[in-house]
Image (cartoon, grey):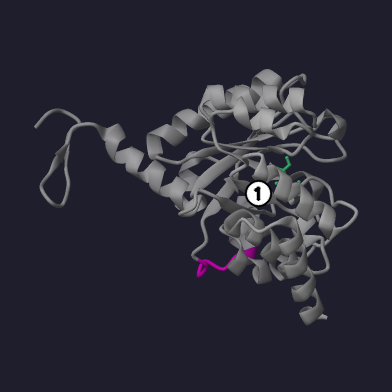
Amino acid sequence: MTPGANRNCAGVVSVHKEEAMDWGMKNRMQRIFKDDGKAVMLAVDHGYFLGPVSRLEEPRKTIEPLIPYADSLMLTRGMLRNCIDPKYNIPLVLRVSGGNSILGKDLSNEGITVSFEDAIRLNVAAVALSIYVGTDHEHQTLINLTKLIDEGQKYGIPVLAVTAVGKELEKRDCRYLSLSCRIAAELGAHIIKTYYCEDFEKVIKSCPAPVVIAGGPKLKNELDALKMAYEAVSAGAKGVDMGRNIWQSRWSVAMISAIRSIVHEKASLKKAYNLFNSLKNKSN
Ligand code: 5RP
């Protein structure tokens, strides 16, 4: 047999290891992006630099009721091991970067915080890290990304890059986000998480990898958050990877249900908001 060739259980010889791994990569992507190619990812990784952020002080209490409505969970390994029952068959997007806190000078100084071996042990569908384009740690975070992508390619695990802005929320404009998203895609990120902004279709058009949006800090009300999700998906986002605008809502189940209707059922903003209100009223 050719060196490196493997015989599978049906006796078929596969010479290209990568080919076998590609199936895993595709399968994991399809676990995250459902049959319609869209994804409702629930981000609960905030504690890695924000600590016990409001409404996530007791993670299990906040997260468990939302699990049936989320296509995947984005979180840290500490949260996963301590707060998520292994009985749940939900795809996991593991945050593997960090090393700083909201009290520190610079949020961009991130390293890789989890070995690939441990990510595999946790049965992840993808790993996630932040990149900080235009900061003092631009190079370091982009190299973190490329190292993870090389590992991801080896094991068939997609890498999600978050185009992070740290404390500089005003950076969230079309020019900056297009630059960051495109760089992440050029370096090989399989999924890109960015912020919604004006002219968002330009960000999407110039980014060849699938894009999902973060929600950012909690908006004034649920309608504003639904509008953001609606406009992002209408502009071509493949879904959302939202946190605070879902679980900081008093009606978090109603909120994630309304988001689902936008992402997976092509609901209009009005229809999604009506759904939110009817579920909210039932839960009162
Ligand atoms: C910051 C992150 C977050 O911790 C989180 O995933 C963002 O979610 P949201 O902004 O919707 O609360 O990735 O870079």
Q: Quadrant of residue 73?
A: bottom right
Find residue 118 and report its horizontal and vertical position in percent: 50, 47
Q: Residue at x 52, y 67 (%)?
A: 88
| Magenta-colored segment: predominant secondary structure | loop
Q: Quadrant of residue 232?
A: top right
Q: Quadrant of residue 99?
A: top right
> Which amino acid type is shown beneath numbered disc 1?
Val
Residue at far right of view: 220
Q: Residue at x 56, y 49 (%)?
A: 93
Residue nearest the viewer, comparing 239 with 139: 239
Depicted 225 relative to depicted 136: above or below:
below
Q: Which residues are magenta?
A: 83-88
Residue nearest the viewer, comparing 92 with 121: 92
Depicted 93 relative to depicted 196: above or below:
below
**Residue bearing mark 1:** 240
Q: Is mark 1 within 8 Å of ligand 1?
A: yes
**Residue 72 visible in rendering:** no
**Residue 91 visible in rendering:** yes
Find residue 132 and report its horizontal and vertical position in percent: 72, 27
Quarter of the rendering occupied by the C terminus: bottom right
Find residue 151 and report its horizontal and vertical position in percent: 45, 33
The residue carrying pointer 1 sits among few (fewer than 14), some (14 to 19) or many (20 or more) residues within 10 Å by Cα, namely: many
Check disc 1 and report its element: helix, strand or loop.
strand
